[in-house]
């Protein structure tokens, strides 16, 4: 069966998007999804997104990791999906849609897509790390030399040794100034470093505020693939009104056969 696909990227975090409103895509075919995401034998992507109808909202987003299995929330994927919904003329500049972790709002302004993330209230602070779930579980750890840091090796070790089979995404951070931070992320499901991670930089921004590295609640995150911004409000030990903002681009379209 042939499928038209669209290749998207959001600060280098890249995705295959398929319009699955007809529900014809073989969602249980893990092998095919993994092959499509393979960078040598397929299209190449960090994950695959299905755009589906929703009874009450604008659309439903279904996300698969590059290993072919259903993933948790993907922030950059969500922003790319909003761009795609606008491309399909399903939405204009505002939307409400469903993802794996619940309902999200988003809007498009000045070619940037801002996605509202779920509230965060449970944060674990260790001796040299912070852990929280921003739609996906994230370990945040500061390092002195991020440029030369072995992200894949160290990230893989933390992902499996600290968090077991379920694992977690691992973010390594270097502070640039009062409200700018550089981030590199190891993603579970991809099992490698990605150029950017939306739920990851969201976790980093909150972790930096929570551990008094910054007093800013509008934080700029510099990833390997580009710049993202996260803003939030902290009320009664709870982080609310969390928005992840940045660019999203449709790179090309093609046919999988």
Image: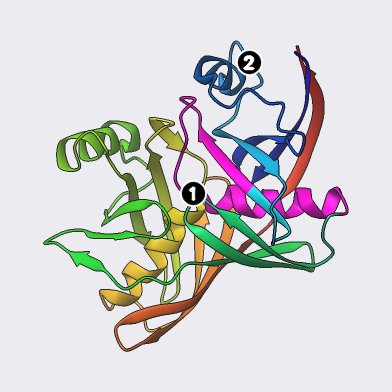
Residue 212 percent coordinates (x, y): 27, 78
Residue 33 percent coordinates (x, y): 57, 22
**Residue tagged by mark 2?**
42
Query: In what element is the residue under mark 1?
Result: loop
Check whether the beta carbons of the residues at disc 2 and disc 1 lie within 8 A of each other: no
| The magenta stretch spans residue 82 | yes
Start-end of magenta stretch: 61-89
| The magenta stretch spans residue 20 | no
- In this view of the protein, which residue sits in the foreground, 92 or 251? 92
- In this image, 202 relative to 90: left or right? left
- In this view of the protein, which residue sits in the foreground, 169 or 96? 96
Residue 14 percent coordinates (x, y): 61, 37
**Residue 96 image-quadrant placement:** bottom right
Looking at the image, residue 219 lies above or below residue 99:
below
**Residue tagged by mark 1?**
197
User: Does any portion of residue 11 appear in the rendered image?
Assistant: no
- In this image, 177 relative to 161: left or right? right
* Residue at the (70%, 39%) spot, across then down: 8
């Amino acid at each position: 069966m042939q499928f038209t696909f669209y290749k998207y990227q959001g600060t280098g975090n890249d995705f295959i998007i398929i319009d699955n409103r007809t529900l014809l895509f073989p969602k249980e075919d893990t092998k095919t999804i993994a092959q499509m995401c393979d960078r040598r034998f397929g299209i190449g992507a960090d994950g695959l997104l299905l755009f589906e109808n929703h009874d009450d909202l604008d659309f439903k987003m279904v996300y698969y990791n590059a290993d072919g299995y259903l993933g948790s929330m993907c922030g950059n994927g969500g922003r790319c999906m909003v761009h795609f919904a606008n491309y399909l003329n399903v939405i204009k500049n505002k939307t409400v849609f469903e993802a794996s972790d619940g309902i999200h709002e988003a809007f498009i302004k000045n070619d940037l897509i801002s996605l509202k993330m779920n509230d965060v209230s449970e944060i674990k602070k260790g001796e040299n790390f912070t852990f929280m779930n921003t739609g996906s579980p994230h370990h945040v750890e500061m390092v002195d030399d991020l440029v030369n840091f072995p992200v894949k090796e160290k990230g893989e070790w933390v992902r499996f040794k600290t968090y077991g089979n379920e694992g977690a995404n691992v973010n390594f951070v270097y502070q640039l100034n009062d409200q700018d931070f550089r981030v590199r992320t190891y993603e579970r499901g991809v099992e490698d470093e990605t150029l950017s991670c939306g739920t990851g930089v969201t976790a980093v921004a909150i972790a930096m505020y929570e551990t008094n590295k910054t007093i800013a609640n509008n934080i700029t995150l510099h990833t390997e693939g580009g710049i993202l911004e996260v803003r939030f409000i902290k009320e009664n030990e709870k982080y609310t009104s969390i928005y992840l903002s940045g660019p999203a681009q449709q790179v090309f379209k093609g046919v999988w056969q």
